[in-house]
């Protein structure tokens, strides 16, 4: 790697790949540290149409989290929410399995209206971020539809049917990303990953199989990460053999993958320059190929989120220094 391609330590663009809740927590910490220098490439494999509306769960979770209006009790949706619409819908016998709050509806209605008018999802999210006072860039992984579908013990299930309606109960045998082969990343995603001042690329502690893999399945994105002129770092979503939230560990077991940070590193083989793991898993350090940084990764408070973001960026800066020195180069 050429030294002249690397920005000064502590400066430059940071790109983070993330899904919903877990990824949004680290995204918030990063946004507080680097602000407008942050680009978030967000999973859209969870997107679907419901009640005639275009729903983007992961994008909306990131938007609400960075905008300071996320519902921290539920872990999704908006704070100070009411549910009059859903109650009336259920009374009529409508599909009430996917909850849409009254305030939340405004985002879905306006997104649907703008998409049908020909505006891209990327442009819509840029406007929504500005409306919520967010300086970071929230970028859908693609403006083309990519839909996560699971092969389960109950047959083929669209992601939201599996995740929300069936509450992850069916056994997962396989995962596919419909539409990925004909999709492409948006221009802002490509520009962010090719930025001349790129400081770091971070794979957030989102579900690798359901949140990060759809992004990597978008043609061109994996190659951009492999060619990135900055360290690519993943934060393991596994702590002590379990996932903090969601079905990550369950799916790993069903797919025959051990719930370890070593398995996370192997899952991202060929992409990473470093892995961040929790203190609890410090004993795994010697089993993982490549640089490993050990630090608390459980994010219960905003201070935890900032702390982890700071540790990840410091790790990235140290790796970038090594990459700039041919005698200490880090091999992917």
Image: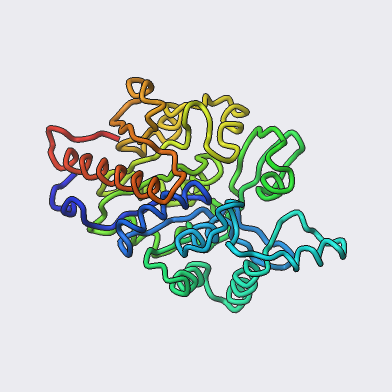
Residue at coordinates 28% horizontally, 46% vertically from top-left? 313
Q: Quadrant where the C terminus lies?
A: top left
In depth, the one of 199 and 2 nearer the eye is 199
Q: Quadrant where the N terminus lies?
A: top left
Residue at coordinates 52% horizontally, 63% vertically from top-left? 69
The percent coordinates of residue 149 (x first, y second) are 65, 46
State the residue lying farthest toward the right: 92
In depth, the one of 109 and 43 nearer the eye is 109
Residue at coordinates 40% horizontally, 26% vertically from top-left? 281
The percent coordinates of residue 38 (x first, y second) are 34, 59
Q: Would you identify the image quadrant in which residue 290 lies?
A: top left
Q: How many marks?
A: 0
The percent coordinates of residue 197 (x first, y second) are 23, 58
Q: How is the image coloured?
A: rainbow
In depth, the one of 82 and 223 nearer the eye is 82
In depth, the one of 227 and 321 nearer the eye is 321
Residue at coordinates 43% horizontally, 56% vertically from top-left? 41
The percent coordinates of residue 213 (x first, y second) are 50, 43
Q: Would you identify the image quadrant in which residue 145 lies?
A: bottom right
State the residue lying farthest toward the bottom: 117
């Amino acid at each position: 790697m050429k030294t002249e391609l690397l920005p000064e330590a502590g400066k430059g663009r940071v790109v983070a790949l993330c899904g919903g809740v877990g990824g949004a927590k680290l995204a918030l910490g990063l946004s507080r540290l680097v602000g407008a220098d942050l680009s978030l490439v967000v999973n859209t494999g969870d997107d679907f149409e419901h009640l005639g509306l275009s729903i983007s769960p992961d994008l909306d979770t990131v938007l609400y989290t960075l905008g300071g209006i996320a519902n921290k009790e539920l872990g999704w949706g908006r704070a100070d929410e009411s549910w009059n619409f859903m109650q009336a819908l259920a009374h009529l016998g409508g599909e009430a399995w996917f909850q849409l709050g009254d305030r939340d509806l405004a985002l879905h209605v306006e997104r649907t209206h703008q998409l049908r008018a020909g505006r891209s999802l990327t442009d819509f999210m840029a406007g929504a971020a500005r409306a919520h006072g967010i300086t970071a860039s929230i970028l859908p992984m693609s403006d083309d539809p990519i839909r996560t579908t699971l092969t389960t013990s109950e047959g083929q299930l669209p992601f939201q049917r599996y995740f929300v309606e069936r509450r992850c109960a069916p056994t997962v045998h396989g995962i596919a990303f419909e539409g990925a082969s004909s999709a492409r990343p948006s221009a802002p995603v490509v520009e962010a990953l090719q930025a001349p001042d790129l400081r770091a690329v971070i794979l957030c502690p989102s579900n690798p199989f359901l949140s990060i893999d759809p992004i990597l399945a978008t043609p061109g994105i994996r190659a951009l990460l492999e060619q990135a002129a900055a360290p690519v770092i993943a934060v393991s979503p596994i702590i002590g053999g379990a996932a903090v939230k969601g079905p990550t560990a369950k799916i790993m077991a069903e797919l025959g993958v051990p719930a370890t940070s070593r398995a996370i590193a192997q899952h991202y083989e060929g992409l990473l320059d470093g892995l961040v793991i929790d203190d609890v898993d410090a004993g795994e350090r010697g089993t993982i190929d490549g640089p490993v940084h050990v630090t608390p990764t459980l994010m219960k408070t905003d201070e935890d989120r900032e702390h982890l973001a700071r540790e990840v960026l410091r790790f990235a800066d140290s790796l970038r220094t090594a990459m700039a020195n041919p005698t200490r180069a880090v091999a992917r």
